[in-house]
Image: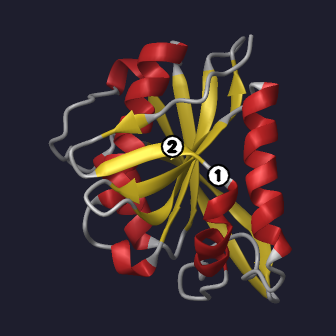
């Protein structure tokens, strides 16, 4: 069973499949050391990485293993980041959530809004039972996004990333279908 690639909308955002024309914006996002401070890979230096990323998004969709969507501000059709559901396992009814946004978009609720819409689609269309996400333990903003969405911190993976010689831990979060609340209101942190 292949995973369909959705086109999703909220009042402020448009989530859509990546296009070749997104390469420049994507490269700018992934070359920003501030944005990638807590990422599991260093900033990109080769513009071809953006083209390979877009090709990988298309291959993921064709293989039916995930959906990585560009996120635009709906009012200006301006690219602000991406959100993905990957490692989809229809047998276990599970998947993983990830996202990356421009620093100019931080603190405005865009990551929460985009991830909530993608989760709504995933739980409704794919009948998922569990979604998992990971974040660097130093990334308090990403942890807040996950907690606002209803994710529960389930544990710590110690020293799982080494980027530019710096070792870091990750928190593992899980969201179970019966705990999912698709409302747009913020959920209390657990």
Give the x, y percent position of residue 17.
59, 43
- The one of 159 and 33 positioned closer to us in this rendering: 33
Which residue is at 32% across, 50% downward? 13
Residue beneath label 2, please?
16
Circle 2 crowding by C-alpha within 10 Å: few under 14, some 14–19, many from 20? some
Query: Is the Cβ of the residue at disc 1 closer than 8 Å to that at disc 2?
Result: yes
- Say whether residue 181 is visible: yes
Which residue is at 35% across, 72% downward? 105
- The one of 87 and 105 positioned closer to us in this rendering: 105
In the image, residue 108 above or below residue 122: below
Residue beneath label 1, please?
19
From the viewer's perspective, tell me whether residue 179 is left or right of residue 88: left
From the viewer's perspective, tell me whether residue 84 is left or right of residue 121: right
- The one of 167 and 81 positioned closer to us in this rendering: 81
Which quadrant would residue 64 be assigned to in this image? top right
Which residue is at 76% across, 73% downward? 41
- Say whether residue 190 is visible: no
């Amino acid at each position: 069973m292949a995973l369909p690639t959705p086109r999703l909308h909220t009042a402020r955002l448009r989530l859509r499949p990546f296009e070749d024309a997104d390469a420049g914006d994507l490269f700018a996002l992934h070359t920003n050391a501030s944005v990638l401070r807590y990422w599991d890979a260093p900033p990109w230096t080769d513009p071809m990485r953006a083209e390979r990323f877009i090709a990988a998004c298309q291959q993921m969709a064709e293989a039916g293993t995930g959906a990585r969507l560009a996120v635009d501000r709906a009012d200006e059709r301006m690219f602000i980041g991406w959100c993905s559901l990957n490692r989809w396992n229809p047998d276990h009814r599970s998947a993983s959530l990830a996202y990356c946004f421009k620093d100019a978009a931080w603190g405005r609720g865009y990551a929460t809004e985009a991830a909530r819409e993608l989760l709504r689609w995933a739980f409704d269309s794919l009948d998922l039972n569990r979604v998992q996400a990971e974040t660097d333990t130093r990334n308090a903003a990403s942890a807040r996004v996950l907690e606002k969405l209803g994710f529960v911190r389930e544990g710590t993976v110690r020293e799982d990333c080494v980027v530019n010689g710096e070792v870091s831990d990750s928190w593992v979060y899980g969201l179970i279908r019966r705990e999912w609340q698709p409302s747009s209101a913020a959920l209390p942190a657990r």
